[in-house]
Image: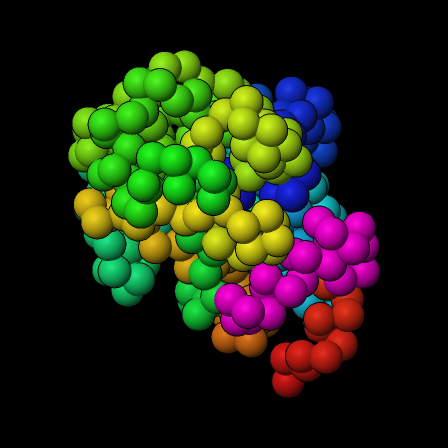
Amino acid sequence: MLRSTLVRTAIAGVAVLGLAACGGGGDPLSGDGDAGSSPAPDKVTSITVGSADFSESQLLAEIFGQALAAKGIEVKQESNIGNRETYMAAIKDGSVHLLPEYTGAALSYFKKDATETEDEAAYNALKAALPSGLEVLDKSPAADEDTIVVTQATATKYNLKSLADLKAVSKDMVAGGSSEFKVREAGLAGLKDKYGVEFKSYKTLDAGGPLSLKALVDNQIQVSNFFTTQSVIKENNLVMLEDPENILPPNNIVPLIRTDHKSADVASTLNAVSAKLTTDSLTDLVKRIDVGKEQPSAVAKDWLSKNPLS
């Protein structure tokens, strides 16, 4: 999932400069760093929490960080780092120590040929696919799935119910969305490989954000990638196309952490957060940010006050 929020416009270049200055050395964009194999510490006194370039990721990072701060851990937030390639480079080189992730999307990043379509299978495969020095903690029941959408007008015009229905008409359509959606298996690559779908052209916009929504509603594009916790889907009467070939993976929320920052109290706190989160509550929280224009930090604080962890 590309959550790679609803402001999902990548500013990765700027964010990475900041990370290089505050992190553990090296260039987070190089991809050459290794998470290492240091054992889990007995005690963690400080931790840097990163997030992707969308509101849900920023919200989850705030929830993680504030929960840890309540346990006496010094927390630094590095929000809005960029897309998955950028923030994965940052956690590998130690610029950040903890990230909210999504099981299926992270699995596809680490294991390009992953085929798991069930929640638990994807989670277990992700644990096995992680490089030395990186771990995932308990997965949450809360999930935010990728979905490929069209407007109701487009669905009616072409009688679209499934992604398979796009094959006959896609050459007359323009798709749009994030740079990741253009190339990943849970996107145009999978649509071509599994459904034989090829579009007339592609507009690079944002990941389920306001640019993609406006282009879709204005019929500048006809197909895009959104996320199931986004209230804009229902509010704009968008149609989520069925995926019989399962190119869209399960995406339960899970903390991704460096082993050298996974002490027992850090793990137990984050696992408690994951257990409390639900898809419905996450949908409501994201709406408060994207529609209500509340700050992720304030929404996270409110959620934690209503969902004590102990």
Q: Is residue 170 left or right of residue 294?
A: left
Can you give x and y, in whole percent of width and height, for residue 302 in the image? 77, 70
Residue 308 in sight in this render: yes
Nearer-the-camera pick, 132 or 176: 176
Can you give x and y, in whole percent of width and height, for residue 137 in the image? 44, 62
Q: Quadrant of residue 8?
A: top right
Q: Is residue 228 left or right of residue 164?
A: right
Does 294 appear in magenta?
Answer: yes
Point 31% across, 18% down: residue: 171
Can you give x and y, in whole percent of width and height, for residue 61 in the image? 64, 53
Magenta region: 277-299
Nearer-the-camera pick, 42 or 89: 89
Point 34% across, 35% down: residue: 158
Point 71% across, 49% down: residue: 290
Nearer-the-camera pick, 6 or 275: 6
Does 108 appear in magenta?
Answer: no
Can you give x and y, in whole percent of width and height, for residue 276 in the image? 56, 76
Point 58% across, 34% down: residue: 217
